[in-house]
Amino acid sequence: MLVFVLGLAVWEAVVFVFAIEFYLLPAPHVIVLSVRDSYPVLLEAGVYTFTEAVIGYALGCGGGILAAMVASRSPGFAEVVLPYAIASAAVPIIALAPLAIVWFGIGQPSKIAIVTSMTFFPTFVGTLRGLDTVPVSSLELMRSYAATEWQVFVKLRLPHSLPYVFTALRACTTLAMIGAVVSEFFGGPVKSLGVYIKSTASLFQTRQAWSAILVACGLGLAFYFAVVLTERLVMPWQRERDRA
Amino acid sequence: MGPPIIDVQGVGKTFDSQAGSTEALREITLAVGPEEFVSIIGPSGCGKSTLVRIVGDLVEPSTGTVRVNGKSPRRARLDRDYGVVFQTPVLYDWRTTAENVRLPLELTGRPRADREARPSALLALVGLAAFRDHYPWQLSGGMQQRVAIARALALEPTILLMDEPFGALDEMTRERLNLELLHVWSETSATVLFVTHSIAEAVFLSTRVVVMTPRPGQVAAVVDIDLPRPRADATRTLPRFFDLVTTVRSSLRDGVRL
């Protein structure tokens, strides 16, 4: 928190001391004032973009988790798919954004498709790793009680995978926001954060662009911490361990 | 002694791997009667853990037969005749102490009243009643292993298989847990097969000690332990205790020469 405040102070001071023009780099207080001025527009754009991010995230992460569950029950399938899933982390899916517009139109579906693709594979790989790295001794305990495959899955594999799943879910909140905002750079309605940032910046309305970036940051952080909060509720044993 | 609870006839085990095959056990024959406490002792790598795993149907024997309660080990496992305590506690991180003890009761679909009451009673038996809502990482190694013992007793198994359960603990904790284990055992009617590499532990706990040779493991000697019961700390100071420790020790040494 102290670092944050200090950082803002330095930023403010640099802009003042070197008399930097506001169209190059506006001082923090100017950005905040700008957010206040264009509040209704930013709110509408923020809701529009955030909706894309959340829906895409839900589809991508949900699909990733389900696919990993299926894959872990059919090891042959997992072996075939996993190398591609891992390699896909190196693919810049965002580069497909212009094509997504061709396929799904200029509206929200094309952005949701990009966010879904960006969040699917990290969640798939993380969940699969969690489900398949159960210690042998834990499995032997289940075996000694003649537990069914289903019991092993529900009472051992799933809870064991949760930390892996949530690591992926946290990382995907950032990916989802990036995916939504950047896809909008390639086209979308005026009342979306990406288009707003791009059009104001090209007109040198830098403070408006910055105010939209600030909104995007705020939404991204809120998204991230919502997932962290969920994680703590779902895994109370981890929370107490972190505190110790 | 009635018919044997555990009947091992000519069991051998060879592990095959890319590096070649390793003969772990050769021609083991052993009968354990009802309510016996039999310890298996031998040098590292002599296959004593493998033997217990074969009895518990966690490993298949290469040769020979095993009968448990007159059934195949597989049938016995499906009938939940076993309680197993491993070298490590194998507690699930996401479950509290009581929930870990409750696991076997959930797996077998015991009635709700049982699932609520039994973990508390078992934790009281191992002296951990106050820790029922703690998570495993909040307990010491010795306490974790006591939870594992409570869990192994949850289904009132006729056979308790213990694979070096106290191997990772310090001497003082181990001696205290030895006493506690005997107390717990006296409250149940389980037959115990106990693997250890501590001579004192084997003599103190057992009705019989099976001494094994280095790999491939064979039975070098069987020593009857005729120390009086109930055993207590004072048992460790009896001349007879030292005699038996010496007997087991020399059998181990003879086993090496065998």
Image (cartoon, helix red, strand yellow):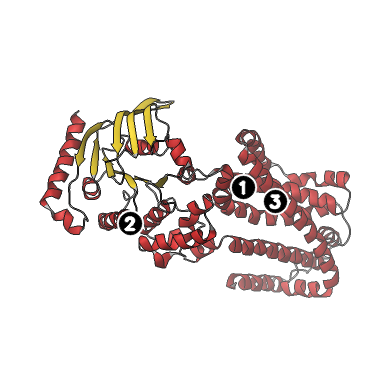
Report how far apart the C-alphas of labels 3 and 2 lie in the structure.
51 Å
B54 relative to B154, above or below:
above
Secondary element at image label 3: helix
Left or right for B207, reference A161: left
Residue at mark 1: chain: A
User: Tag 3: residue type?
Assistant: Cys
- Pointer 3: what residue? A61
The type of residue carrying mark 1 is Thr
| Residue to which mark 1 is pinned | A127
Q: Are marks 3 and 2 in contact (CB under 8 Å)?
A: no
Q: Earlier in the sequence, mark 1 or mark 3?
A: 3
Q: Position of residue A96 (x, y in %)?
A: 79, 44
Decide: few, some or many residues near mark 3? Use Cα within 10 Å; few <14, some 14-19, many ≥20: many
Quarter of the view holding residue B251: top left
Q: Residue at x 41, y 51 (%)?
A: B156
In x, y percent, where is residue B81?
Answer: 42, 44
Q: Residue A94, relative to residue A236: is it above or below?
A: above
Residue type indicated by callout 2: Glu
Q: Nearer the viewer, mark 3 or mark 2?
A: 2
The residue that mark 2 highlights is B187
Q: Are marks 1 and 2 on the same chain?
A: no
Residue B216 visible (yes or no): no
Q: Residue furthest front?
A: B2
User: Counting other residues with Cα less than 10 Å from the Cα at mark 2, is it few (<14), some (14-19), or many (20 or more)?
Assistant: few
Q: Residue at x 64, y 62 (%)?
A: A230
Quarter occupied by the N terminus of chain A: bottom right
SS class, disc 2: helix
| Vertical relation: A162 (above or below) A225 | above
